[in-house]
């Protein structure tokens, strides 16, 4: 294992999951910096069934598809059970 954070369930070792905040709405999400998948409900399981994508997430709030709308935060630490 590398020093990366939690693996993305859709792109595996390539992705790093990070916490992010939608600047305009304050919504807290988890996003993969590699494949643009977003988990709008971080309290749920981070799996493909709960994922959307950055463009869809921003569109739901009437925002443009622009990563600048997201304020990226800390990496999600690996699950202790992984
Ligand atoms: Zn990914």
Image: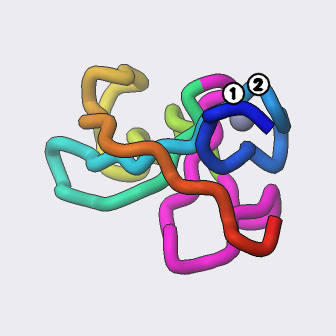
Circle 1/circle 2 CB separation < 8 Å: yes
Q: Residue at x 50, y 70 (%)?
A: 41
Quadrant occupied by the N terminus: top right
In percent of the image, x 42 and y 56: which residue is there?
29
Alpha-carbon span between mark 1 and mark 2: 9 Å
The residue beneath circle 1 is 35
Which residue is more in the foreground, 57 or 38?
38
Report the magenta residues as a range. Answer: 34-51
> Is 73 above or below relative to 26?
above
Neighbour tally class for label 2: few under 14, some 14-19, many 20 plus, Cα within 10 Å: few
Place of residue 61 in the rendered image (x, y in percent of width and height, measured from the top left) = 31, 50
Q: Residue 80's spot in the image, x, y percent?
A: 69, 71
- Image point (28%, 49%), residue name: 21
User: Does the magenta-highlighted stretch encompass residue 60?
Assistant: no
Residue 7: % across, % down:
73, 45
Picture layout, residue 57 above or below residue 32: below
Count of marks overlaid on the render: 2
Q: Does ligand 1 reach within 8 Å of label 2's beta carbon?
A: yes
- Residue 41 falls within the magenta-colored stretch: yes
Instruction: Give x and y (percent) for residue 19.
Output: 40, 50
Q: Quadrant of the C terminus?
A: bottom right
Q: In terms of secondary structure, what is the magenta stretch mainly?
A: loop
Q: Could you tell me which secondary element the residue under label 2 belongs to? A: strand
Q: Is mark 1 within 8 Å of ligand 1?
A: yes
Mark 1 crowd level (few <14, some 14–19, many ≥20, 10 Å Cα): some
Taking the image as four quarters, which one is ligand 1 found in?
A: top right
Q: Foreground residue, 65 or 74?
A: 74
Above or below: residue 63 compared with residue 68: below
Asked which quadrant contains residue 17, the reply is top right
Depicted 39 relative to depicted 10: above or below: below
Report which residue position mark 2 lands on. 14
């Amino acid at each position: 294992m590398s020093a990366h954070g939690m693996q993305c369930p859709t792109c595996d070792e390539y992705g790093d999951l990070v916490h992010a905040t939608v600047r305009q709405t304050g919504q807290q999400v988890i996003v993969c910096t590699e494949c643009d998948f977003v988990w709008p409900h971080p309290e749920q399981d981070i799996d493909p069934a709960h994922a959307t994508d950055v463009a869809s997430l921003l569109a739901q709030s009437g925002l443009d598809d622009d990563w600048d709308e997201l304020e990226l935060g800390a990496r999600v630490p690996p699950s202790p059970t992984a």
